[in-house]
Every structure is written in structure tokens, then in C-alpha cells.
Image (tube, rainbow, N blue to C red):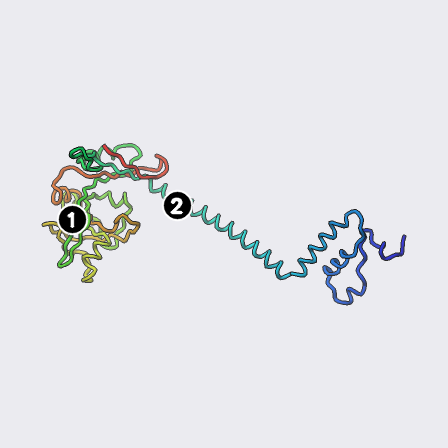
């Protein structure tokens, strides 16, 4: 066995000098020093490459640590975002499935001088149609509607809005909430009582400037006086869901439009009919 220090290691590396430990060199630095001293033989190039890489990493310890930390944070952020997105999508799907499908049934289309007057312009729907729809399978709720554009007046304040005659099923179908007061009763509906529920926008326009609580106040629609029994909670979402006044269906038919027909029937069906969506039926 050779006593030459260059052949003392079988891997071709010169052993670390005993003075290295005395000089306070770390084990990793000692290993790097050994890797730098090698002979050209089989396997020496990969060892040299690894040694060079380790040396570069050790020489830039802080930068290497920050780089690894950045990679870790980036990967963790992507995983967390994907998890949250999937959770939110699942929650929304469950909420929509629990609501079911809302179908709008309109009457036929009238034409004048060959020009279509639009969906629902031909009044053919009746309360009997709504009752027939209510007996169909998968139907959860039905509500006929009568709609008209009117001007509501309170004192010196006035506001043009849409008045909708609906029944007691309507807030259930639409998921409406009241900020104050209560919805009208079945007795109010059957008797054609002159009571009204104001949308948030209407309440603000008529009573906001005066600061008066709308409940039990009287407003005028055409030549009819209505008592306010409720104020709808703010809905938002566009399409004027807050700019509306709700009155009992019979009240709108008799006192505002003088018609036995209805303009629209809303039908809520369960989620068994496919993914929830809105359908417009015309007949």
C-alpha cells in the first residue's frame, strides 16, 4: 500500500488536512476542499460538477435560501388558491342547486299592422293557468304577476316606478327579505286590500328627504291610497330589483289594471330538471 498522500483515498480525493479542523473550517467547507482536489479518472467529472454546484450554493447561502423560500411560497400559494377556488365553486353550485330553476311563463305576442308588440303583449294567461301549473310534477311554487308602471306620491315627493301585483308565494319564490314590516296576508290578497310593500329605492325617494319611517304611512298610486306595511331589504344586482312596489294580486287586477288576466307566471321547480337556469316560455 502506497504511502503517497495522493493515493491514500480510493476516490482520488486528498484527505482534509488536520490543520483544517484546527483552523475552524466547517465539515461542509472541508468536503468542498476535498472535492476540489481530485485525479482525472472515471467518475471525476460528475464529482467535480457536484462540488462546483455545492460550492456556489454555499458561497451564496442567503441568496440560495431566499430562492428556495420564494419557490416554496409560490407553490404553496398556487395550491391554496386552487383549493379555495374549488371550495367556492362547490359552495355556489350547492346553493344554486338548493334554489332550483325559475321559469317565467309569458302570454302570447300581439302584432299591430304587422309589427310585433313584444312578448306578453297578448293577455291570455289566467289564474286557472297558474293553478294548473302548480299541479305539475317537480313544481315547488307558482306565483302569477300583474305589472304596471305608475307614479307613487307621498306629500310633495313623487317617484315613477313599477307596481307589481303578486301573491303570498312571491317572496318565497324570489327569496325576498324585508328590512321592516311584514308581507301582506292571504286575507289581504283575497280581499284586494290597499296595502303596499316598498322597494328600497322607492322608500328612499319618497321618505328619505323627510326622514319619516315609511311604515303605516299612506301613499297615493293613481287615485288609490295605499298603506305601507313593509319595506324590502336592499337587493342590488341591477335590473331595478329595488325600484318596485308590491301590492296584492287582486288589488292590482281590480284597482290598477282592471283586468282578469295576469301578465306573467313565475314557476319554481326543483333541481331534478337539470342545472338551474332561467327559461322563458310563451304560449
State which mark lies toward you, 2 or 1. 1
Residue at the spot 77% in from the left edge and 50% down from the top edge: 44
Cα distance, mark 2 to mark 1?
A: 37 Å
| Earlier-in-chain disc, 2 versus 1 | 2
Give how far across and how far down residue 65 sits, in percent: 61, 59
Classed neighbour count for the residue bearing mark 2: other residues with Cα under 10 Å, few (<14), some (14–19), many (≥20): few
- Residue tagged 1: 150
Q: Which mark is residue 127?
A: none
Residue at the spot 53% in from the left edge and 52% down from the top edge: 76
Give how far across and how far down residue 11 sits, in percent: 80, 51
From what the image shows, is residue 26 above or below residue 230?
below
Secondary structure of the residue carrying numbered label 1? strand
Secondary structure of the residue carrying numbered label 2? helix
Is residue 29 toward the left or the right of residue 151 in the image?
right
Classed neighbour count for the residue bearing mark 1: other residues with Cα under 10 Å, few (<14), some (14–19), many (≥20): some
Residue at the spot 79% in from the left edge and 56% down from the top edge: 37
The residue sitting at the left extreme is 223
From what the image shows, is residue 167 above or below residue 67?
above
Give how far across and how far down residue 236 sits, in percent: 29, 51
Give how far across and how far down residue 166 sits, in percent: 20, 43
Q: Which mark is residue 92?
A: 2
Amino acid at each position: 500500500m502506497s504511502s503517497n498522500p495522493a493515493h491514500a483515498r480510493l476516490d482520488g480525493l486528498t484527505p482534509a488536512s488536520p490543520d483544517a479542523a484546527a483552523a475552524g473550517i466547517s465539515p461542509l467547507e472541508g468536503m468542498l476542499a476535498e472535492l476540489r482536489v481530485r485525479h482525472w479518472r472515471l467518475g471525476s467529472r460528475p464529482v467535480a460538477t457536484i462540488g462546483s454546484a455545492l460550492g456556489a450554493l454555499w458561497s451564496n447561502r442567503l441568496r440560495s435560501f431566499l430562492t428556495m423560500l420564494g419557490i416554496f411560497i409560490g407553490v404553496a400559494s398556487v395550491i391554496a388558491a386552487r383549493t379555495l377556488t374549488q371550495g367556492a365553486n362547490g359552495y355556489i353550485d350547492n346553493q344554486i342547486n338548493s334554489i332550483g330553476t325559475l321559469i317565467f311563463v309569458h302570454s302570447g305576442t300581439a302584432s299591430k299592422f304587422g309589427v310585433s308588440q313584444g312578448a306578453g303583449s297578448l293577455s291570455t294567461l289566467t289564474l286557472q293557468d297558474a293553478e294548473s301549473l302548480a299541479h305539475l310534477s317537480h313544481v315547488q311554487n307558482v306565483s302569477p304577476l300583474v305589472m304596471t308602471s305608475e307614479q307613487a306620491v307621498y306629500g310633495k315627493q313623487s317617484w315613477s316606478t313599477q307596481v307589481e301585483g303578486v301573491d303570498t308565494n312571491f317572496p318565497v319564490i324570489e327569496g325576498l327579505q324585508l328590512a321592516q314590516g311584514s308581507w301582506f296576508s292571504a286575507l289581504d290578497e283575497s280581499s284586494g286590500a290597499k296595502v303596499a310593500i316598498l322597494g328600497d329605492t322607492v322608500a328612499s325617494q319618497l321618505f328619505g328627504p323627510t326622514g319619516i319611517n315609511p311604515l303605516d304611512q299612506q301613499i297615493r298610486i293613481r287615485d288609490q291610497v295605499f298603506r305601507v306595511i313593509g319595506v324590502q331589504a336592499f337587493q342590488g344586482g341591477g335590473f331595478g330589483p329595488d325600484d318596485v312596489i308590491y301590492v296584492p294580486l287582486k288589488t292590482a287586477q281590480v284597482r290598477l289594471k282592471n283586468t282578469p288576466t295576469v301578465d306573467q307566471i313565475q314557476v319554481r321547480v326543483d333541481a331534478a330538471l337539470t342545472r338551474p337556469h332561467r327559461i322563458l316560455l310563451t304560449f
